[in-house]
Amino acid sequence: MFDMRSAIARKRDGRRLEAGDWASIVAGHQHGLVDDAQLAALLMACVWRGLDANETAALTRAMVGSGETLAAPAPNCVDKHSSGGVADSASLIVVPLVAACGIPVAKLSGRALGHTGGTLDKLEAIEGVRTDLSPERFAAQVRDVGCAIAAQSERLVPADKRIYGLRDRTSTVECLGLIASSIVSKKIAAGAPAFVFDVKVGRGSFLTKLEAARDLAAAMVELSESFGRKAVALVTDMNEPLGPAIGTGLEALAARDFLRGARGGDRRLRALCERLGTAMLAVGHAEGDLLATVERALATGAAYERFEKMLAAQGAAGDALEKLTPHKTLTPLRAERSGYLATVDPVALGLAARALVERSGSSAGIVVEKRIGEHVEAGDGLATVYGDPAAAPRIADAFAIEDAPPPERPLVYWETGSPGTLSAGGRTAARSSVEMR
């Protein structure tokens, strides 16, 4: 009989648990032989002591085995994951964009967590859209339409859902091995043969240190490859909102306008979508000039057409995209002094936008009008608040103006992945084309 007390003590003392131990722990928790108190103690020991690569792989394998494992909907399909950010509508953009370039995308997504936005919540801000697709319908849509974005089925990795809920309640989220196994187990179970991971770093991310973000990116790539999958991971900046729109409906609207080819849009959002899109095409074995392929799909309207088809397949009303409009009540936030925008607090903005949506509906939120490093004059607009105007004074506190400009930051700090898929080969820092404030 498995001795859970002994396993807790061994991990507490910094010793490694074997693959069979992790299998017994996961199965025992599923069947009531390991209670929440015991598992919580083990999870805290993991936060203190960490998991090595073998333990992480064993835990991942045990969680995958707790439910069904799907066959790939298409032999060259890809999945994409973001570790969570603010104003990050990239998934709504790159999924149909990559599908329009000929590589199917089978994406399982999650809901908002804390200050970060959830892709499922943004999709459901579009009238009629459903994300609770059965595994069979999910796979069929990828084959028929070329892409799908859906919630994780109860039939896939049920152990992860229970363990993650316990981690959330016991403040044991911050362990790289636990994070990597949670993310990768869902991707493995969903069946796609290739993944692209967008690991956020900075004050608006759950990972604030570059070294930790790089470690997580490398761990997820290594873990994916141990299961025979190809993977690329990018470490990207989250010290300010990625795009200008924050809020479920506003971000869906921003994705709509981006895919329609609206010019003059946010250059950071566009640069990251291009980088993610080309990485997804690469792991999906697309050939040729991948950036040119992405730009052509946007310019011809093919990406927007694919977006419409995906939404229709998931129940969207015929005029749902046209109905996306900002809340009619708006409050401009203006700079009180001249200078350079030195910091923008993405956590404060993310939480404020979430509260606005809860009070005023999915069309509420915040649109940021200035980027860190830009010069502003007193009276210039910093942002616009849509919805409850009472939130405006608190939101204004998220912007800080100083006399001197802050140092520049790259958009992409680091990239690692399967051989032959990287833009510059090997592990690489950001290219100059995406180095910006």
Image (spheres, helix red, strand yellow):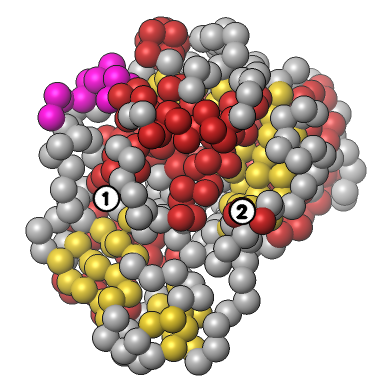
Which residue in the structure is indicated by mark 2?
A: 433
Q: Is residue 144 magenta?
A: no
Q: Residue at x 53, y 47 (%)?
A: 272
Which residue in the structure is indicated by mark 1?
A: 250
**Which region is colored magenta?**
307-319
Q: Position of residue 68 (x, y in %)?
A: 55, 12
Q: Residue at x 38, y 8 (%)?
A: 144
Task: Find residue 260 and report its image quarter.
Answer: top left
Q: Position of residue 53 (x, y in %)?
A: 83, 36
Q: Amino acid at mark 2?
A: Ser
Q: Position of residue 96 (x, y in %)?
A: 41, 27
Q: Taking 45 as reference, is 261 left or right? A: left
- Which label lies toward us, 2 or 1? 2
Q: Position of residue 377 (x, y in %)?
A: 35, 87
- Name above or below for residue 264 compared with residue 180: below
Q: Amino acid at mark 1?
A: Leu
Asked whether the viewer can see residue 303, the reply is yes
Task: Work out which quarter of the rendered image holds the C terminus and state it.
Answer: bottom right
Quick one: SS at disc 2?
helix
Dot 2: within a 10 Å radius of its alpha carbon, few (fewer than 14), some, or many (20 or more) residues? few
Asked whether the viewer can see residue 55, the reply is no
- Name above or below for residue 359 compared with residue 50: below
Q: Residue at x 62, y 33 (%)?
A: 279
Quick one: SS at disc 1?
helix
Of pointers 2 and 1, the one earlier in the residue sequence: 1
